[in-house]
Image (spheres, helix red, strand yellow):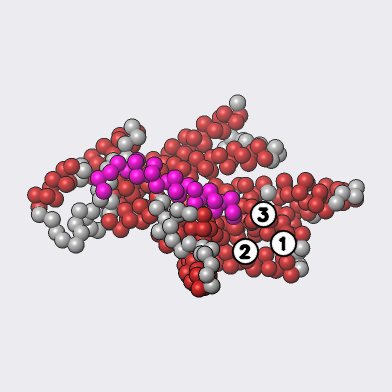
């Protein structure tokens, strides 16, 4: 019963948050200068009037918002002002690629980040610890688009040319998402920053756990270090890491916007960036609503999983 109340309360908060997100996105984008139908050449006034009437832009902003909100409640995100395709269809077709990229990046960051953080904690103060934390420092300091550009230039272009000169095949593809070697560099670029955060958090948490009395008791009983680390310490040390997976998922998905453009990946991030550049109101709102709902749901799932992983966590009111 307590879990049900907690879930219902969180769902209510999520609905309110999503509504605020929809409202802010809708009204703020209407404040941007420019017109979605004016490109390099100005259109005749009759054509402009017809386009505005077709997409409902001839009404007041308040009326447009109420109509749009009603359509959203029925699952209709409108037509793209640039392609005249349903926004929901574009999202359904392109998010598959973005989700594939994001999942790969999160798995890469989580597995390697936990491993680096654990090794750094075990080898505290030694060269291994310094190397692991230096990697983490670089990951936290360097933005994903810089990492993506460096990987694309040195591994996707320079290394490929060197290998081709030696009569060998390309190890990494510089662009695209249609082969196994084209999916390596985008995943590395997108997940590197999250890997750094996870490794730093894991190291701190692991050092705290290794100093607990029950770990000292396990050592006194003669348990081997691998058994102590993997069976006793890591489960408790990994709990704080799980709590940040929601924000990390948000960072990975929003970071994918730039990475997808750099590597020419046909994902939702590319459409989102293009919609901002062309002032495609319905596409901006649709992708924002979709990502907002996805991230809110991800954070809710993380909160629930946190309670399952650590039975000591109690769900309380307030």
Residue bearing the label numbered 2: 136
Crowding near the residue tagged with mark 3, few <14, some 14–19, many ≥20 C-alpha atoms within 10 Å:
many
Q: Are marks 1 and 2 in contact (CB under 8 Å)?
A: no
Q: Quadrant of residue 286?
A: top left
Q: Residue drawn 87% across and 49% down?
A: 223
For disc 1, the neighbor class at 10 Å (few under 14, some 14 to 19, many from 20) is: many
Judging depth in this view, the residue of 251 and 180 nearest the camera is: 180
103 within the magenta span: yes
Q: Residue at x 32, y 48 (%)?
A: 283
Q: Which residue is mark 1?
A: 120
- Mark earlier in primary sequence (2, 3): 3
What is the magenta segment's predominant secondary structure?
A: helix
Rendered location of residue 75, percent (x, y): 35, 35
Residue 230 appears in the rendering: yes
The quarter in which the C terminus is drawn is top right
Q: Secondary structure at mark 2?
A: helix
Marks 2 and 3, Cα distance to the nearest angstrom? 12 Å
Residue 304 sits above or below residue 107 on the image: above
First in sequence, mark 1 or 3: give its number: 3
Q: Nearer the viewer, residue 191 or 295?
A: 191
Task: Identify which residue, 264 or 3, lies in the foreground.
Answer: 264
Secondary structure category for the residue under label 3: helix
Q: Left or right: where does residue 191 sit relative to residue 29?
A: right
Q: Secondary structure at mark 1?
A: helix
Inter-mark Cα distance, 1 to 2: 11 Å
**Do the numbered discs 1 and 3 sit on residues whose CB atoms are within 8 Å?**
no
Q: Residue furthest front?
A: 167
- Residue pointed to by mark 3: 114
Query: Sequence-wise, which precedes: disc 1 or disc 2?
Result: 1
The magenta span reads: 83-109
Q: CA distance from mark 1 to mark 3?
A: 10 Å
Is-magenta flag for residue 224? Answer: no
């Amino acid at each position: 019963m307590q879990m049900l109340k907690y879930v219902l309360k969180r769902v209510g908060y999520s609905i309110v948050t999503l509504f605020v997100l929809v409202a802010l996105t809708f009204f703020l984008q209407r404040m941007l200068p420019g017109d979605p139908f004016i490109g390099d050449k100005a259109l005749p006034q009759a054509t402009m009037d017809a386009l505005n009437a077709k997409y409902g832009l001839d009404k007041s902003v308040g009326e447009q918002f109420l109509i749009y909100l009603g359509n959203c409640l029925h699952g209709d995100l409108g037509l793209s002002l640039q392609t005249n395709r349903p926004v929901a269809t574009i999202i359904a077709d392109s998010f598959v690629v973005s989700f594939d990229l994001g999942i790969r990046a999160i798995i890469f960051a989580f597995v390697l980040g936990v491993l680096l953080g654990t090794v750094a904690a075990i080898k505290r103060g030694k060269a291994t610890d310094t190397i692991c934390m230096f990697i983490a420092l670089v990951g936290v300091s360097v933005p994903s688009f810089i990492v993506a550009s460096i990987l694309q230039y040195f591994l996707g272009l320079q290394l490929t040319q060197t290998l081709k000169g030696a009569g060998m095949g390309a190890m990494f593809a510089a662009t695209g998402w249609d082969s196994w070697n084209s999916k390596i560099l985008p995943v590395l670029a997108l997940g590197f920053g999250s890997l750094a955060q996870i490794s730093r958090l894991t190291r701190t948490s692991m050092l705290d756990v290794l100093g607990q009395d029950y770990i000292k008791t396990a050592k006194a009983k003669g348990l081997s270090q691998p058994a102590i680390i993997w069976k006793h310490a890591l489960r408790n040390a990994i709990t704080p890491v799980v709590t940040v997976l929601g924000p990390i998922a948000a960072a990975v998905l929003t970071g994918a916007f730039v990475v997808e453009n750099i590597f020419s990946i046909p994902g939702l991030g590319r459409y989102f960036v293009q919609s901002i550049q062309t002032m495609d109101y319905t596409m901006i709102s649709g992708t924002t609503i979709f990502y907002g709902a996805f991230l809110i749901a991800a954070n809710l799932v993380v909160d629930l999983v946190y309670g399952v992983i650590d039975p000591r966590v109690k769900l309380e009111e307030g």
